């Protein structure tokens, strides 16, 4: 029986961070590749997900740490709209569905 909740630490972490006004650091490059997409995946069953098997990039050293940290609203909005947009407006839902159907038909790569 499939559960109606996600078995992932990420949702709890995000919630705890949100209610404590926490900030998180996101790298400018992808540092890890999720190879757990597919039928056997716990929360990532879609093998066609854009997050499946992302290319890994090296981080540039030496790292340059800022003197202080403040919220970057533009970066937060970008991250929310690209990674965490679970309920996009209707137009984007339709666009995503059309693109998925076109990819399936082989008309778009």
Image: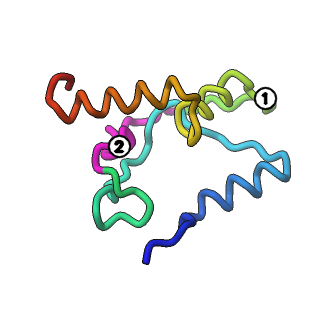
Pointers 1 and 2 in contact (C-beta within 8 Å): no
**Residue 65 drawn at (x, y percent):** 68, 32
Q: Residues within 10 Å of mark 1 (few under 14, many from 20)?
A: few
Residue at 35% across / 57% down in the picture? 45
Q: Residue at x 66, y 27 (%)?
A: 77
Name which residue lies at 73% across and 26% down: 72
Q: Main secondary structure of the magenta part?
A: loop
Residue beneath label 2, please? 49
Q: Which residue is mark 1?
A: 67
Q: Is residue 67 above or below residue 48?
A: above
The residue sitting at 20% across, 26% down in the picture is 109
Residue 13: name its quadrant.
Answer: bottom right
Region rendered in magenta: 47-61
Element carrying mark 2: loop
Asked which secondary structure carries label 1, the reply is loop
Taking the magenta stretch, the answer to whether it contains residue 69 is: no
Label 1 vs label 2: CA separation? 37 Å
Q: Position of residue 5 (x, y in %)?
A: 57, 66
Q: Is residue 94 above or below residue 84?
A: above
94 w.r.t. 87: above or below: above
Q: Position of residue 103 (x, y in %)?
A: 23, 31
Of circles 1 and 2, which is in front?
Answer: 2
């Amino acid at each position: 029986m499939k559960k109606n909740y996600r078995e992932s630490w990420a949702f709890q972490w995000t919630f705890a961070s949100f209610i404590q006004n926490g900030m998180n650091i996101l790298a400018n490059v992808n540092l890890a590749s999720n190879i757990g997409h597919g039928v056997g995946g716990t929360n990532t069953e879609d093998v066609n997900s854009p997050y499946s098997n992302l290319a890994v990039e090296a981080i540039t050293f030496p790292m340059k740490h800022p003197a202080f940290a403040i919220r970057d609203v533009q970066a937060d909005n970008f991250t929310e709209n690209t990674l965490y947009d679970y309920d996009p407006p209707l137009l984007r839902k339709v666009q995503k569905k059309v693109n998925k159907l076109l990819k399936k038909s082989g008309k778009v790569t």
